Amino acid sequence: MTFFTTSSPLYTINYWDDANCYFTLGRSIIHGLVPYKDVYEQKGPYIYFIHSLAAAISEDSFIGVYVLEIIFAIVFTIFVWKTVRLFFPYTRSSLALIPLQVVVTYSTFAFYYGDSAEEICFPFLAIVVYYGIKNEIKGTLPDKKQTFVIGLIAGAMFFVKYNFDALIFGYLIFVLVSSLARKKYKDLLVRVGIFLLGFALAIAPGILYFYLNGALNDFITAYFYNNIFLYGMVQSKFHIQNNLYYISYSLRQNEHIYLLLLLALFFIGATKKGVKNMYLLMTAMVILATYGMSMHMFYYGFILTALLAPGWAMVAFLYGKLNDRIDKATSSRSLMRFVPVFLIVIVTATKFITHDNIPYLMQPEENIPQVQIGKIISETSNPKVLTYDVMDGGFYTYSGALPANKYYCFLNIKSSLKELGDSQDEAIRNGEFDYIITFSDEFCWDKYEIVYSHTNDRLLRDAFGLIEETYYLYKRVE
């Protein structure tokens, strides 16, 4: 994670707009601002609460995010390994693949710059996959403790990005049908109650937080109504040709995800019927929730990583077979016995060398507009800032500013949520901001003038190629 996520201390900034929006909301929370009521964003509240923990560690860097990303990666690695061990004992076939699994998972293009909602959530969904496979191999229903944990995870996912619950929904359908087929009516009712208890306890802190802050209606409107209806309008306008391009781009750039998913399906196909049916149902639900939307982004498929443990079991099986053949064909001290290890080292080294974020290691601050613009803004006490036609990008973090307007930055929902643009334009006309930041476009505002522009030497990665970054900083005319 030190090398792959740009939240790491080895990177000057985390370059991703989404990650910076989450972090700004996290900083806002610890300063008493309430998401949706005081600061508008469209993801679930728990991703902001998580980033408030990160901001409590460090407000002017992503060190806290980096620490949390390591924890999430550890959780994922443990449960992938535990799932593989359901099919193979504690041998080098399962243990030796851990470094490879970690590197391959976090070197994918879908990881982008690090700190996505998908990255935070799929480690916990991998726990559900582990429970499901373990129980079906044993021919049992999830026990009470497992059911409670699954309920907690489902509730947490619901308040991060609710379509992530598709995997759990698929598993619940399977458990329901399986319980009815086995005539386990009483056990089913008990588990439904336990699941709902876990789910309720998971969402209760969020509901209580918004209720106590008088923001429950704001939360419901922004997270549910606006996302379902208004953001859906944005998605429906997303041209089908663009959508198909993004999906094909995702397939090409994140090939390991889809290759391992195919290996997983092949491997699961040779297991018990119950395991196979359960896994296919979970996979179908995740694919439907991920690709059934009218708009697709190239990192959406990263959530499929939660399903890839059986793919790694297939890799472990092939790895073990290769070891067995070498053992039979050579003496115990032969260098040939290290061929599988050599393969792992080669793949790992290649992933490090070719990873998209590596060129941005230790970038000098003078090359980064967010840092340079942040320094100018920070010269003003308690600056009021707006990123007008661009998402946050890190300008709030590196200037130390907090949102001065509920609609503090550009969001994709702007074309459908009229209030967003109107609020920003009115505040600009009234001269309410000290600084405004725009991306690639110059605007003519009576009370503002351009005081700085920065064309970045670094080219921004985008699914349609490489685009050049140019930012303009406007300052209010006194």
Image (cartoon, grey):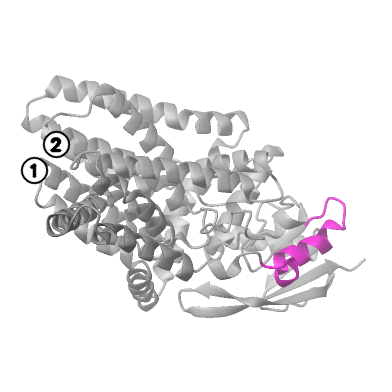
Mark 1, residue position: 272
Estimate the x, y position of residue 394 in percent, counting from the top left: 66, 59
Residue sitting at x 45%, y 74%:
463
Task: Check the image and report above or below for 76 versus 295.
Answer: above
Total labels drawn: 2
Quarter occupied by residue 183? top left
What type is the residue that disc 2 sits on? Answer: Ile
Residue 128 placement, left or right of 475: left
Quarter of the image for the C terminus: give it.
bottom right
Estimate the x, y position of residue 131 in percent, counting from the top left: 25, 35
Residue sitting at x 40%, y 28%:
200
Tell me whether the residue at label 1 lies in contact with that at label 2, contact meaning CB atoms closer than 8 angstroms: yes
Q: Which mark is residue 393?
A: none
SS at badge 2: helix
Disc 1 and disc 2: Cα gap in Å? Answer: 7 Å
User: Who is closer to the viewer here, 244 or 411?
Assistant: 244
- The answer to whether residue 297 is seen in the rendering is no
Does the stretch in magenta take in 95? no
Residue 421 placement, left or right of 99: right
Quarter occupied by residue 170? top left
Could you tell which of marks 1 and 2 lies nearer the N-terminus? 2
Mark 1, other Cα within 10 Å: few <14 / some 14–19 / many ≥20: few
Estimate the x, y position of residue 198 in percent, counting from the top left: 37, 27
Residue 290 placement, left or right of 389: left
User: Who is closer to the viewer here, 220 or 118?
Assistant: 118
> What are the residue bounds of the magenta stretch?
363-384
Task: Check the image and report above or below for 376 versus 441.
Answer: above
Estimate the x, y position of residue 24 in percent, counting from the top left: 65, 50
Q: Which mark is residue 137?
A: 2
- The answer to whether residue 143 is seen in the rendering is yes
User: Residue pushed farthest right?
Assistant: 478
Does the stretch in magenta take in 367? yes
